[in-house]
Amino acid sequence: MGQRYLPVACLKALFGWGLLLGAALVLGLFSPLEKTPWLACVLLAPLIHMLNHGGRTGILKGLMAGWIFGTLSWAFGTFWLLNAMESLMDLAFWQSSLSLAGIWLYQGSPFALFGALCGWMNRKGAPAGPLFCASLLTLLLYLRPVLFPVSWTVAVTFWPGFIQIADLGGELLVCFCLIWVNGLVADVFSGMRQRKVKNFAVSFISLFILLALVLGYGVWRIAMLNGEEREAVGRSIRVASVQPNVPVRWDSKNIVNFKTDETLCLEALTRNPDLVRDADLLLFPELPRMDCRSEEFEKSGLRAALEHLRIPVLMHGKEEIPAPEAPVIHRLEAEDRSIVEEKLEARYSAVFALDHGKECALVYRKRIPVPFSETSLYSYFFPERIQKPGLKLWLSRGSKPGLIPVGDFSVQPMICFESGFPELVREGVGLGANLLVELSNDGWFFSSRAEKKHLGMAVFRAVEFRRPLVRSSNSGGGAHVRATGEIVEGTLTPHDTVWVTQEALFCPDVSTLFARRGYVWLWGAVLIVCWHMRSALGRGRKALSCRV
């Protein structure tokens, strides 16, 4: 018998799907792309090429291609959430796996709708162009309610020249330009493959112009801010940050002998006293057990050490407000220890300020708790619903930014997950915040890349509002970030290590377009999408009339 070969169409399909899955793997697993950030300009191109240049892609095939790409890139990029489900929520492995599958499918839904609409455009005889793709997918990402605000745009976090346009339109504008670039790359590849010189030339020149504009603006903006920093006097604040390497999960067999958070913080602080002595502000990360108002805090010696430093300190803690006349309840722990608890009217994740000679004062309450571990899915989508007094299942929500005066500067705090929400930062900057600080708990990440993604969310907040940012983490991913989005050399804290950093950060006195106008530019994307879909409908009617 003669040897059989797969048809050419099958080989092309296998190659296309393989390229799509490979791009999703790289985009998810290796983000942020520290060494090769330019890869973000080509990793979405296989999806766009399949949707618009890969033959007769209809609505169903486009839906499946988009959903597979979006879901897998999210799954590869956030596999560490499995450990979070098991550690923070005490779920079984199968429960965590099913929950994550639902989250990943949900996060992939904008790509699914994007693929379906591109397939619909193909059916109408008007394949989607790069500008339409950028406008449509950006709008879908914006309209989707965000459970976890980790965007694939974080892939270019460590490419300062490309992300400077965020001060014009936020992280979504960077996303828009990345999709546009990927669409043009797909057009260039299609022009080469089909040997259409004119199409190739137009796409290549458009790609060159777009990259030149984005990167040119980035270089100019960084140079201008650096020039202001060299000329300014008295507009820098020196901030120190302590990373004590405290895990969020402990071995239940050794929990009695485990050192307290306060003790580990004291050891980290005393290990590098010169790095905190002349600071204007000292930060400790989000730590579940530390409470600056507790007896353990007094006994640990940490308070005495901080009083000796004579500088303002910000630290995380829990604020619990008992419900009036509520009965006490007894809860049996896994270690067979009976713990007496009071029913609570409210429970907050909060930031406390400890200044020399003063009491530990509440300064900020977390406004966006983490869904599933700190708040229910229902209360996440309906925050106006106040939980009933007496329940200790979820955290309550704070109501205001809570700016903190430090000398001549005003500091806006954030707690962990909140760095992914620019609307919170916009409110604080509007009230006069000069410096952003984030107290984070990343101890349950078993991947250092996950911590860098969390850091990437914060980097965009610094660029969007031109405010320096200090991220203090308990176990990796902390950093001092300039208003340009550049991470100060030597301040990126390594995973699973005790570390102390200090750096003076310049606070520019500027108001960005994004801070003043927000996402108003998205109306332009709406017009582009409507115009192209209207043209597709008109072309479809014309084709139908010709057949008749």
Image (tube, helix red, strand yellow):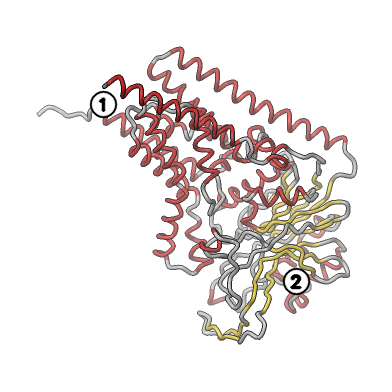
Q: Position of residue 21 (x, y in %)?
A: 40, 40
Q: Position of residue 271 (x, y in %)?
A: 76, 62
In which quadrant of the rendered view does residue 211 lie? top right
Which residue is under mark 1? Answer: 8
Residue at image point 42% right, 51% down:
105
Farthest residue in the right direction?
233
Give the amino acid at mark 2: Cys
- Mark toward the start of the polypeptide (1 vs 2): 1
Q: Residues within 10 Å of mark 2 (few under 14, many from 20)?
A: many
Numbered tag placed on residue 470 in the rendering: none
* 60, 155: nearer the viewer: 60
In which quadrant of the rendered view does residue 177 lie? top right
Looking at the image, is 368 positioned above or below residue 111?
A: below
In this rendering, position of residue 166 left or right of residue 103 = right
Give the amino acid at mark 1: Val
Quadrant location of the N terminus?
Answer: top left
Asked whether residue 244 is in view, the answer is no
Please tell me whether mark 2 sits on a helix, a strand or a loop.
Answer: loop
Q: Position of residue 268 (x, y in %)?
A: 73, 63
Cα distance in 3D space between marks 1 and 2:
69 Å
Q: Position of residue 82 (x, y in %)?
A: 47, 59
Residue at image point 73% right, 48% down:
469
Quadrant location of the C terminus?
Answer: top left
Residue at image point 58% right, 74% down:
388
Please tell me whether mark 1 sits on a helix, a strand or a loop.
Answer: helix
Q: Residues within 10 Å of mark 1 (few under 14, many from 20)?
A: few
In this rendering, position of residue 488 left or right of residue 41 = right
Looking at the image, is 403 positioned above or below residue 213?
A: below
Looking at the image, is 518 positioned above or below residue 427?
A: above
Which residue is under mark 2? Answer: 292
Residue at image point 62% right, 47% down:
457
